[in-house]
Amino acid sequence: MQTSFYVAHGRFRGIFSWILSTDHKRIGLLYLCSILSFFIVGVTLGLLMRLELFAPGRTIMDAQTYNALFSLHGIVMIFLFIIPAINASFGNFFLPLQIGARDVAFPRINLLSWYFYITAGILAISTLFAPGGPPDAGWTFYTPYSIITTTSVSLAAFAAFVVGFSSILTGLNFITTIHRLRAPGMTWFRMPLFVWSVYATSWVQILATPVLAIVMLLLIFERMFGVGFFDPAKGGDPLMFQHLFWIYSHPAVYVMILPAMGVISDIIPVFSRRTIFGYKAIAFSSMTIAGVGYVVWGHHMFASGMSETARWLFSFLTFIVAIPSGIKVFNWVATLYRGSIILGTPLLYSLSFIFLFSIGGLTGLMNAAVATNLHIHDTYFIVAHFHYVMFGGAGFAFFAALHYWYPKITGRLYDETTARVAWLIVFIGFNVLYFPMFILGWQGMPRRYFDYPLEFTNAHMISTIGSWILATGIVIMFVNLVLSAARGRNAGNNPWGGATLEWQVSSPPPAHNFEEIPQISKGPYDFN
Ligand code: HEM
Ligand SMILES: [Cu+2]
């Protein structure tokens, strides 16, 4: 890594120049490092679960341990990995650069939001050692079980409460930054599509996340003081928990996927040497997805008991989300069509994003139809579906961003051949791991079980072997990125020939981004 910028900068030295920095690039990297650490924790838990499921019966752990693992795996992957993955790390690093600003609007609040994040992370991990043992109620904390269990559900819920503040503060910061700090000439329709996606995401974060905070607080009060919000014996309603939970958690999937779509919209034009097709349609579809996303939460509850009217309404509204998503896929493919395609690693991850996200999205429509939903509810079909969306979608876009912006962040190039080999192994491993889960679920294998009947053995074995292939690919990818930070060739300012502003400054970018605030006179994908 080129050290000039990263070692001595600002008032503080050494580690303090990082953890007390208000520079958006350093805060972005604090997020990136911590997010990657939690990803490794989450993957380890996932691999252990797959090991248990390699054969029927008890393989390496008992049922209670398995319950703890899927709960912690879900909590870590959702709240600590995929929600902040692209938005908090690359959003922080690149949003000011892309709009021609020197920093975000509130740099100290920006640092504070990382402290909320890391505190929440430590709290979540500490449940492993807490009295009562790690939480076992899943990442969804459904009542009434989450009220009864003696495991450390309260601590985990508190962690989710705290991480919400990080999300809200980041959203506020980004919205203000985009409204107030765009360089002269950077009109709304000259903003890179990544900025549009971060903008849409931020609105979801500040409007939806408070609901999560409230419901987590209610759950903690219920557990500590037996208030009776959710306990039917006291006149409470367990279904109310599900409503409140999904009013946040469905919009949360857009916090995961919108920045991912933004990254893809930035990478595809650069790697096909063409202006993006349908710029405005992509920008508006981000806003539409963010908007419609608020009114579809009930599709998680078709089996929980609700009126026929509510069912068809939630089903219908959910189908509508497919339209803006389809618009994006169409525009990406139209951009690639007749482009001069350069099959670099960022594009390979982007293409696999389109493929895997489409599988995730189309199986989402199967979930949205009430009739099929009742058949596959709470089965491995759902586990397959959401891994395709969150991991195959948002996760692969995170890997795409990691490779795309790597030269800008480190000033060096990763080894291209190794990166492509790693991509191929990750892609194959991913599908071997998760595709069999569609079949398992369709045949009736329920989720969140540590054991299964004999007839499911083959598919489970294949899936576990897939997890080993995937893990191998991820290790190769990370080793390549780490080694190249020290040894890679010099990247120069603009190795991919990108037209957005971050490529006009040095790699890594200078401390205050721009000597002089640039004057913008063209769109982000005008390559000439
Ligand atoms: C090597 C990588 C991974 C493996 C092997 C893996 C495996 C698993 C397994 C076996 C389950 C439990 C199925 C069940 O018994 O119901 C699960 C659940 C889950 N996974 Fe993963 N997973 C991986 C990566 C991810 C990623 C990247 C994300 C998010 C982006 C994620 C999010 C989730 C969630 C939210 C659950 C549901 C937890 C719950 O039921 O409360 N996983 N995963
Ligand atoms: Cu949903």
Image: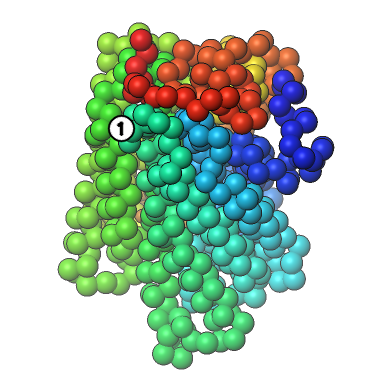
Q: Residue at x 45, y 81 (%)?
A: 230
Query: Could you tell whether 381 is left or right of 217 in the image?
Result: left
Whether the residue carrying mark 1 lies under 8 Å from ligand 2 is answered with no
Residue 152: x and y in percent read 66, 69
Whether residue 208 is visible to the viewer of this picture, yes or no, is: yes
Whether residue 466 is visible to the viewer of this picture, yes or no, is: no
Q: Which sits in the foreground, 183 or 94?
A: 183
- What residue is pinned by disc 1? 189
- What is the crowding at mark 1: few (fewer than 14 residues within 10 Å), some, or many (at least 20)? some
Q: From this viewpoint, which residue is outermost toward the bottom?
A: 234
Vertical position of residue 398 compared to residue 215: above or below: above
Q: Residue at x 61, y 20 (%)?
A: 507
Q: Which sits in the foreground, 422 or 373?
A: 422
- Tally the marks: 1
Vertical position of residue 343 compared to residue 429: above or below: above
Label 1: state its secondary structure: helix
Q: Which sits in the foreground, 212 or 448?
A: 212
